[in-house]
Image (tube, rainbow, N blue to C red):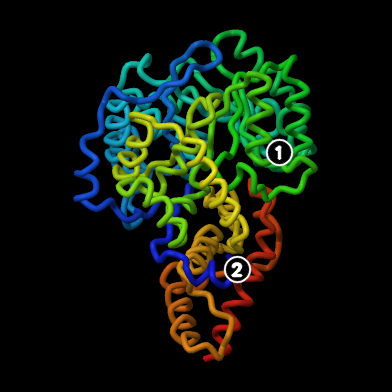
Amino acid sequence: MDRRHFIHTASAAAAVTAVALQGCKTEKKPEAAEEASLGEIPTDRMEYRTGEHGEQVSLLGYGCMRWPTLPNGEVQTEGPAKGSDIDQEAVNRLVDYAMEHGINYYDASPMYCKGLCEQATGIALSRHPREKYMVATKLSNFDPYYWPREKSIEMYHNSFKNLQVDTIDFYLLHSVGGSGMEGFSKRYIDNGMIDFLMEERAAGRIKNLGFSFHGDMAVWDWCMEQHERIHWDFVQIQHNYVDWTASRRTEAHNGDSQYLYNDLASRNIPAVVMEPLLGSRLASLNQHATAELKALEPQRSIASWAFRFAGTQPKILTVLSGMTYMEHLQDNLRSYAPFKPLTDEEMSLLEKIGHEFAMFPTVPCTACAYCMPCPYDIDIPEVFRHFNNCLNEGLMQDDETASDYKKLRKKYLSSYLGKVSRDRQADHCIGCGKCMEHCPQNINIPKQMQRIDQYEQKLRESL
């Protein structure tokens, strides 16, 4: 399939991606008839996997970085969440429903939801018996302010307070590899934090110690070499049918999720999955790929294929999903309660689709929003999301002589202004590079901003 054909056969039902630090927007809800035909979601069919210490972990884990927010900039005016813009009542309803349907793994971080994630998660979870859930959180000491040992330890202790727990079931070094070996050393080795966390695990305040990985294979190799000394109880990796073999990384063995998973499996280290939908980009596909999947499972969502892929490998402990709305939660529950692993034929089909997807010239942004806030107030995730969606929807047209050029130009520019306010668009980027320090996908954000701005300028000049 050539590039032009791929672009112009893309589906108009582009994925809507949530932004972790700024609240979320809903995706299209399942059709009522389709949802009804699938029947009620059972409360006793969740798939469970066994952890390092015998824990029974739900295969679907709740990623808490995208909790719903109150409308119109409102904040809570009373109660334990006073001052927060998170919709705590909605969070409570989501957690209650998840608990009822067998989800027992909840993944938080001190940095998510403008720093309010752990508090909101703790409020919701504390309403349930402690033995009914497992909580994961992270040492998210990205800012140099938290590199000193005492500041990192302060962040660690605050997590217990905010989550309202005495023990943390799964504790992670956050975003290992994102800043290379030098950054990793400053955050975790030079300040003695790895040794401190090992001591906390030995004391029982941490049950499982692991890390989340983002890209630098030199750091991965160091961590694996240290496994005998540290003993990683689990590792969190980006895993989906695009990253499985079609890696964007450039190291000798690529660091694709197939390599990472197999390396962990060979050491008997359970894997936790992040980005099963690649920032919601796998929630909708081009028309050809959609038709192939719908021919096999006409009533299942396109997203469900990504979740089935993520859970098929046996050493996957749990698959995280940031489920902002009830329809997201319900759709994902249908993938894992009960769970139907992919057949060899289905796996081959998804790998083929993944290779085609990787050739598509979108920006590999997962909308994690680690790059935010931008010092020049550019809405980086939304700019990338709009650009990617327009590619997916076939709105990109370079040929000014084409019959549909004026129509597509107008639609692109009007939708850009509708999604991103004029003072937060790509042309405000000065290339300072601050955003790149925190991007787990190693995207050259200023270069991509320049690319998008140049395309927009070309469209404006052709008026």
Numbered label attached to residue 177? 1
Looking at the image, is 405 positioned above or below residue 196? below
Q: Position of residue 389 (x, y in %)?
A: 48, 64
Residue 424 visible in the picture: no
- Residue located at (62% from left, 9% from top): 202
Q: Nearer the viewer, residue 144 or 404?
A: 404
- In this rendering, position of residue 232 left or right of residue 86: right
Q: Mark 2 vs mark 1: give the one in front.
A: 2
> Which picture quadrant has residue 90?
top left
C-alpha distance separating marks 2 and 1: 34 Å
Q: Position of residue 188 (x, y in %)?
A: 71, 29
Where's the N terminus, which quadrant?
bottom right
* Amino acid carrying mark 1 in the image: Gly
- In this rendering, position of residue 184 left or right of residue 167: right
- In this rendering, position of residue 256 left or right of residue 380: right
- Residue located at (27% from left, 35% from top): 93
Looking at the image, is 144 positioned above or below residue 413? above
- Residue located at (47% from left, 43% from top): 306
- Residue located at (28% from left, 22% from top): 44
* Amino acid carrying mark 2 in the image: Asp
Provide the secondary structure element on which disc 1 rests.
loop
Provide the secondary structure element on which disc 2 rests.
loop
Q: Which residue is mark 2?
A: 2
Query: What number of labels is visible?
Result: 2
- Asked if labels 1 and 2 touch by Cβ distance under 8 angstroms, the answer is no
> Which picture quadrant has residue 14?
bottom left
Q: Position of residue 315 (x, y in %)?
A: 56, 24
Looking at the image, is 211 positioned above or below residue 437? above
Q: Nearer the viewer, residue 367 or 113?
A: 367
Q: Position of residue 318 (x, y in %)?
A: 48, 28
> Label 2 crowding class (10 Å Cα cut-off): few <14, some 14-19, many 20+?
few
Residue 400 visible in the picture: yes
